[in-house]
Image (cartoon, grey):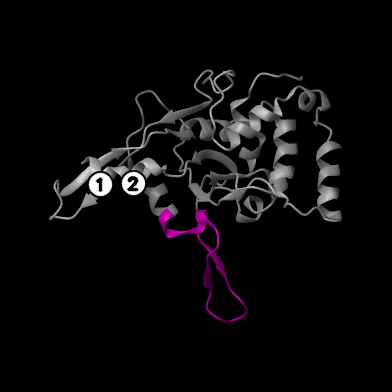
Amino acid sequence: TSSTLPDSTWSPYPNESSFRLGEWYWNDGTCKSQASFKKLVNVITAPDFSTEDIQKTKWDVVDRELVLERDETWDGWEDVDGLGWVESPVTISVPFHKNTAHPGTQYYTLPDNFRHRRLLSALREKVQSADFRHFHTHPYELHWKYGDASDDRVHGELYWSDAFLEAHKSIQAQPSEPGCKLEKVVAGFMFASDATHLTAFGDASLWPLYLAFGNESKYRRSKPSCYAQSHIGYFRKVSGSLSVVPTTV
């Protein structure tokens, strides 16, 4: 059903249809092509695409949120039932030379909070979605053998790795929660980040933090149509106020 209420899954977009349209607009390059046009057609002709949702989307508000400028008139960032986005303060350590007035490490709290989504919320969403059927909850080794030659171990997926196997073994050895008979498995969180230029003109940019799960095959993670990667946080550029730290400590 159509709704203008913000869904934490697609924040800062209020719904999936506006997210898909926005993703095409921002991520498909500033110079449009026939291939880009076909992608747009696929977006707007999808069976679950809602034109009503995109008509109700406050695009100017979404754009301001994407460049991390607060909009105090809209409460769409409210964390509903623990599923939304939150903000956390960030403190960094700044080392000073022994010959300065206050040598050693000084701490500086950034004026802007780090906007991010709780990892457990993202994991819960993934586990409860249809995508979970593609999850590999049990790691294993993959070997390839040709003819009479000795077999070779194949590497290429996180759930084939020694690290994943060791983590799985370790968690099985831990005692279960009292009264819990659920299976214990490992979730492989994988993060990536890359700056995104938002417009063909000007210097507006966005630096999102992406989350993917190593339990899914790299072939699914690399396909945009699988939506296997999602925004989990937004980095802010360090403001000019950091330059005053040496004169104030």
Q: Secondary structure at mark 1?
A: helix
Residue drawn at 52 percent across, 78 percent down: 150
Residue drawn at 60 percent across, 36 percent down: 66
In this rendering, position of residue 95 left or right of residue 86: left
Quick one: 144 or 43, which is closer to the camera?
43
Task: Look at mark 1 in the image and give the residue it sits on.
Answer: 246
Task: Look at mark 2 in the image and give the residue it sits on.
Answer: 243
Q: Secondary structure at mark 2?
A: helix
- In terms of image quadrants, where is residue 74? top right
The percent position of residue 117, horizontal first and vertical second, equals: 50, 33
Q: Is residue 140 visible?
A: no
- In terms of image quadrants, where is residue 8? top right
Residue drawn at 44 percent across, 38 percent down: 184
The percent position of residue 176, horizontal first and vertical second, equals: 36, 32
Mark 2 crowd level (few <14, some 14–19, many ≥20, 10 Å Cα): few
The percent position of residue 65, horizontal first and vertical second, equals: 59, 32
Q: Quadrant of the N terminus?
A: top right
Q: Which residues are magenta?
A: 140-163
As drawn, 154 above or below 61: below
3D distance between C-alphas at marks 1 and 2: 7 Å
